[in-house]
Amino acid sequence: MIVRRLLLCLLLPTFAALSAGSLPGSAQGQETTMRAAAVVNDEIVSALDLEMRLRIAMSGAGVQDAPEARQRLLRPVMRQLIDERLQMQEAERLGISVPDEQVEEAFERIAGNNNLSPEQFAEAIRGAGILPQALKQQVRAALTWRAVVDRRIRPRVQIGEDEVTDLLTRLKEGEGQQVVRVAEIFLSFDDADQEAEVRTTSERLAEQIRQGAPFSEVARQFSQAATASVGGDLGWLLQSELPPEVGARVEQMQSGEMAGPIRSISGYYLVLLRDRRTGTGGGGSETKVRLSRIAVPHAPGEEQAAVAEAARLTADIQSCAQADALAVEIGGQTSDSAGDLPLDALPESIRGMVRTLPIGQPSEPIAANGAANVLVVCLREQSDGMGRDQIAERMSREKVELEAQRYLRDLRRAANIDIRV
């Protein structure tokens, strides 16, 4: 799974990069941080919960801890915490829980994405003023809600053959037309009373992105769409497949431009137009690649030495077999088990290099998250687009997410929520 791990290493900022903050220690500090920031059905969201989640959000979005950033992120972070309380309460009502082992495994994966052992990662985030348990609570909430959705919603969602055929027909009709690759952040509102607050939240997230926060990381942290886990990326699609109000705005945008908030019937969108091209029909053709990685880790301040060492070690590589052998020799891992990956799914910072790098030849070392990384392209080929199974999976995922949003909306409407900050 090295390709997926590599993507996460390149996409996710290390939590150790957060400016260090102090953890509450004094009796007065403990009293302050344990006061209620919100009450959700008689369950308290403490000021400490809010503080930890703000620090996690700022780290995840790659922004410095500053009063302006805190002000922009306060509303979306509080909304996220309230939603998690509602989700956990519903899971408890249904008798659904996630084993501690599953939470620990997820924590280990996050540590691995940052090139650290779980112990090193825990120490790093403590140094940044984040309690490891706070991050584990967020992980537990996400896994628990997924389990609720898997039990209550997923079995009811069925995609008919006629639905797949209809979409394939529309895609075929789009052959020769312009298709767009768009990323989204979506925040919903349940009624008119919530709309102003959600718009304000959307505006603050948009401003945070304009101040330099990566769109994909803000999407991962705050978007309520099904695409949140992939940084909001919708992939290539016909403009007509977008919600009408979003499509109309995208039509006027240039590649690399962000727009929003854009109001829809149930929420607000922020959209980033990544690219345009002429459609090929059948879901759009795409280039797929298979990569190997060789990583030379380095201590703080030794980046240049690691880059030089990585260049020396990989200078004679002529094939992926050689790359795999060297990776094993120096303690790395190979990418054979990861399968093919769409070129467009790679971070923009390396996509151009991967597109032109000769098969079997090493790239220039890329310094990222505590290591000098050398990539070797093992396979690069053009596919014919999505098949019926892929389209059915995509449609199923979208339907499940829509039903999950409605489920959470109903939980909000039935809840007693008292926000005190």
Image: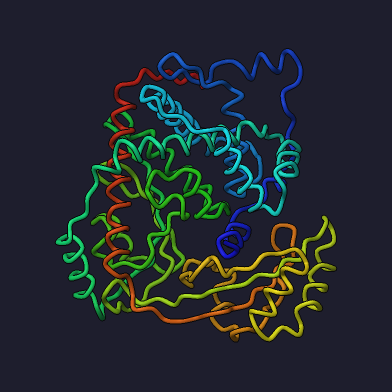
Residue depicted at x 18% and y 56%:
160
Horizontal side, residue 172 vs residue 61: left or right: left
- Residue at 70% in and 57% down: 369
Residue located at (32% from left, 64% from top): 390
Question: Which one is in front, 10 or 146?
Answer: 146
Image position of 402 (left or right of 339): left
Q: Would residue 109 appear left or right of 91 to someone viewing this image?
A: right
- x and y, in percent, of residue 286 in the image: 40, 76
Residue 168 horizontal/vertical position (percent)? 21, 69
Among the 4 quarters of the image, the one containing residue 311: bottom right
Q: Is residue 96 above or below residue 376?
A: above
Q: Indicate the quadrant where residue 188 lies.
A: top left
| Residue 313 rendering spot, x and y as whole percentages | 79, 77
Residue 326 spot, x, y in % from top left: 74, 74
Side (left or right) of 302 relative to 83: right
274 or 365, nearer to the observer: 365
Q: Nearer the viewer, residue 298 or 326?
A: 326
Q: Quadrant of the N terminus?
A: bottom right
